[in-house]
């Protein structure tokens, strides 16, 4: 197991996805946010099947930062119940994993200063 994880998030548009990604990368809660625009989501919400265009964001971050990243995304996200899922990484290319750790802040408690 590594100290890095992926975080999966959907957003209502590519512009909103870019806004979310830019904010959390600037705050060093994530090293990167890859945006895949133009996905189609079919899901059940409030008893009805919905069919909507969305954008998908794939974040790379420290596992220890997941809760702070989750809380920040939920606070910024326009959805009532945003998708924020953590996928732990069993292994990866060591230099890339080191870059993720180097590009994010050290873990801080939620509500902490977050200063490096």
Image (tube, rainbow, N blue to C red):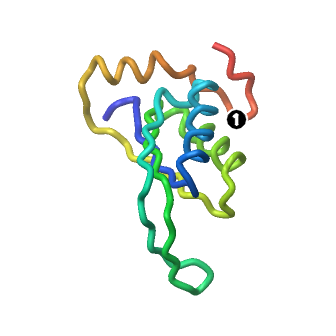
Q: Between residues 101 and 11, which one lies in front from this camera angle?
A: 11
According to the image, label 1 marks what residue?
110
Q: Residue at the spot x=41%, y=41% of the render?
A: 6
Q: Residue at the spot x=63%, y=45% of the render?
A: 73
Residue 75 lies, in percent from the top left, at: 72, 47
Q: Between residues 69 and 12, which one lies in front from this camera angle?
A: 12
Could you say which quadrant of the image residue 66 lies in?
top right
Q: Is residue 70 above or below residue 38?
A: above
Residue 23 lies, in percent from the top left, at: 64, 32
Q: Is residue 73 above or below residue 106?
A: below
Residue 22 lies, in percent from the top left, at: 59, 32
Q: Quadrant of the C terminus?
A: top right
Q: Between residues 28 and 14, which one lies in front from this camera angle?
A: 14
Q: Residue at the spot x=61%, y=24% of the render?
A: 26
Q: Quadrant of the N terminus?
A: top left
Q: Between residues 15 and 26, which one lies in front from this camera angle?
A: 15
Could you say which quadrant of the image residue 19 lies in?
top right
Could you say which quadrant of the image residue 101 lies in?
top left
> At numbered mark 1, what does the secondary structure look like: helix, strand or loop?
loop
Residue 34 lies, in percent from the top left, at: 43, 38
Residue furthest to the top in view is 116
Q: Residue at the spot x=43%, y=56% of the render?
A: 38
In this picture, residue 77 sits left or right of residue 58: right
């Amino acid at each position: 197991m590594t100290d890095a994880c992926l975080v999966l998030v959907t957003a209502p548009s590519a512009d909103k996805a870019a806004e979310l990604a830019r904010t959390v990368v600037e705050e060093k809660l994530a090293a990167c946010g890859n945006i895949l625009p133009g996905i189609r989501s079919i899901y059940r919400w409030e008893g009805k099947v919905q069919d909507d265009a969305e954008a998908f964001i794939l974040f790379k971050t420290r596992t220890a930062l997941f809760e702070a990243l989750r809380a920040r995304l939920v606070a910024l996200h326009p959805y009532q119940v945003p998708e924020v899922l953590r996928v732990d990484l069993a292994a990866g290319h060591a230099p890339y994993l080191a870059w993720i750790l180097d590009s994010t802040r050290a873990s801080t408690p939620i509500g902490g200063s977050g200063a490096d």
